[in-house]
Image: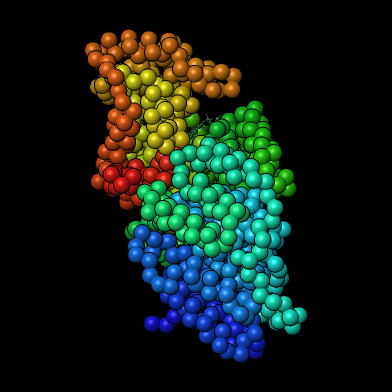
Amino acid sequence: MSSPVSYKLEGIIGVITVNNPPVNALSQPVRQGMLDAITTAQGDDSEAIVIICEGRTFIAGADISEFGKPMQDPFLPELLNTIEASSKLVVAAIHGTALGGGFETALAAHYRCAVPAAKIGLPEVKLGLLPGAGGTQRTPRLAGVKASLDLITSGAPISVGQAGKIGLIDKIIDGDLRDGALAWARELVDAGTSVRKSSEQPVPEFDAAIFDEVRATLAKRARGQVAPGHIVTAVEAAATGSFEDGMAKERELFITCMESPQSAGMRHIFFAERQAAKVDDLAKDTPIRPVESIGIVGGGTMGGGIAMSIANAGIAVTMIEISDEALERGLSIIDRNYAGSVKRGKISEEKAASCRALISGSTDYDSLAEVDMVIEAVFEDPILKKKIFGQLDGVCKPGAILATNTSYQDVDAIAAATKRPQDVIGTHFFSPAHIMKLLEVVRGEKTADDVLATVMALAKKIRKVPVVSGVCYGFIGNRMLRPYGKTAQLLLLEGASPQQVDSAMESWGMAMGPLRVFDLAGLDIGYTARQALSEEEKGDPKTYRIPDLLVELGRMGQKSGSGFYAYDDNRQPTPDPAVDGLIKMAADDLGVERREIQDEEIVDRLISALVDEGRKVLDEGIAQRSGDIDVVYVYGYGFPVSRGGPMFYADNIGEM
Ligand code: 3HC
Ligand code: NAI
């Protein structure tokens, strides 16, 4: 089998080229090929060596699919030590993204050049790991302690411009990278430049208090995660000891992380997210319809956020509202959100202005005559939605995709309100829609393949994580939330307090406990929905008596200042004795005996409720695969990524 690494002497430069599509990950054959090439280069006529990659990117990291299996020689840290020990000058030439082990390879080179659009980063923390091939030791020696901690604990890639400022990139190459890198390597040789080992650079001065400060911040930001704290320890070792000792510490901590269930869960989500973007029965060559303009019907909470997501990807938006006043209100919320993003440094003022300029408003459905797609986001009222789809059918051009953002309603019934059900699909965004990454793509019975393929591609373009769902009440996520919510109500009646339920779940890792979630969403929504149901349809009163009583007392949740909790002006919850009394009363009334409930039981019963429904969702073919359900819960419902999603967790209980 031919090696994914080639070596060629070009004049005085030995060129090592990595070609391992799609992202040049450092699989065993790549490591072996690089080791062979660097060894060859030591004995030939080369005077300097350039490491460069084919395809869309420089090395994007270790091969994650090898993790969890026995590692094979040559190990990456040893390979990188060999590269750094080269007697001939080594230059890394970067394009695309140099990430993780890829950037560590660049750090082992003596000099680094990159094209202006390239990015570098150490994203291991997002996989529950720390850089394990010298990243925690070489980075602080070049960039200092603070910049290194920022880079490695966030895992966020940075531009080469930024990387240049902190000493991680030496030269930016405009034009052809290969030509530029070889020319620069020759210049370095001509100038008599000597090798410069990152490992031998002294760590710039730093404030010793920084380690504890960062540990304290991370304890809050990355609650319960092990890797961030280990990163701080490894960087501290770099700053306070020898390179060799630091490398030993890094290795020890890397192995601890690699063997942890947290990393297993996060690696599962990495691959599950990418898998979720694929639709099993959709041919690879399914055509994509052009989507250059999108109409949004309803500029409320969701419509405004959806408009921003789309405009942020450079697509023009026309937002339709019922009146000038409602339109004005919707657009002004968008203005406020952009201003907030600028203030928090999320985007530049210019970028915000150019995105905002792509959003226009109208009260006339005829403005949608030429758009390529419409997303409906009006009130959750099936009759209204069907009426609007009838109207859209009348005004939209043939081939326009008609999508609904409904949370629960039957997409097939909505499609049937048009004469083109093949063009209708569900696009279920999550709130706040310009921030939340998840997009449930609801495939109706008659949705055409190219409509589905187009929406999956659009999701990627607007930087969402799409998951395909079949049609059922609540699709994947909200459907599973119902038994979860009902179980929370039973736990209250049986003796737990709202704060006990929430804190048990939050300590376990959920971003927010179920009762705080209900208060946030508004208890009146479920109440109103129940009013339309018969007693039989409503089911066991134990599963809804408490929220009914709360709503009847005017306690709708955060928006009315009280629900399961009392809220202050900053929307901070405090336990409310009145609620405890109301729960006891409901339990008496329904004949439920109260007892002491342990946190463990709370977690077990709530997670089992999710998982049991998840299994039904899978059996019925609503979700394509169990990993898709995990992606929905991690990206849409604050399920801890370090537990890999509910289905992965259930399949691996005992190890988590
Ligand atoms: N290992 C194995 N496979 C990888 C991979 C990796 N490091 N990175 C990406 N892939 C695979 C994906 O699974 C996907 O496979 P598929 O086509 O079969 O689904 C394919 O490559 C393309 O990936 P994306 O769809 O993500 O492509 P994008 O162009 O959207 O993004 C990227 C490219 C920015 C490089 C993104 O893939 C990415 O962020 N990759 C992970 C980078 C990373 O985490 N590196 C660190 C690894 S850990 C490490 O290096 C440890 C070291 O310190 C010892
Ligand atoms: P909202 O009440 O904030 O906004 C609805 C908007 O639609 C209002 O501004 C209203 O004026 C407008 N509208 C009503 N009839 C209209 C018509 N005929 N033509 C044009 N505009 C019209 O509602 P929200 O929360 O934005 O929800 C919209 C949809 O999104 C619902 O189907 C909801 O179930 C779904 N959804 C809501 C989520 C949430 O957290 N709020 C999350 C995910 C989906």
Front position in the image: 426 or 475: 475
Observer-nearest residue: 305 or 558?
558
Question: Is 344 left, or right, of 546 in this rendering?
Answer: right
* Residue 239 shows up from this direction: yes
> Relative to residue 88, is residue 639 drawn left or right?
left
Q: Is residue 240 left or right of residue 128?
A: right
* Residue 32 x/y as whole percent: 44, 76
Q: With respect to residue 585, does 365 lie above or below?
A: below
Q: Quarter of the image for the C terminus: give it.
A: top left
User: Which residue sits at x=61%, y=80%?
Assistant: 87
Q: Residue at x 71, y 68 (%)?
A: 171
Reply above or below: 251 against 297. below
Query: Compared to 576, does 490 lie above or below?
Result: below
User: Residue 412 location, x and y as percent?
Assistant: 36, 42
Q: Nearer the viewer, residue 18 or 596?
A: 596
| Foreground residue among 148 and 573 | 148
Indicate the quadrant where residue 208 lies.
Answer: top right
- In this rendering, is residue 38 above or below 23? below
Q: Residue 17 lies in what quarter of the image?
A: bottom right
What is the basis of the colouring in this image? Answer: rainbow
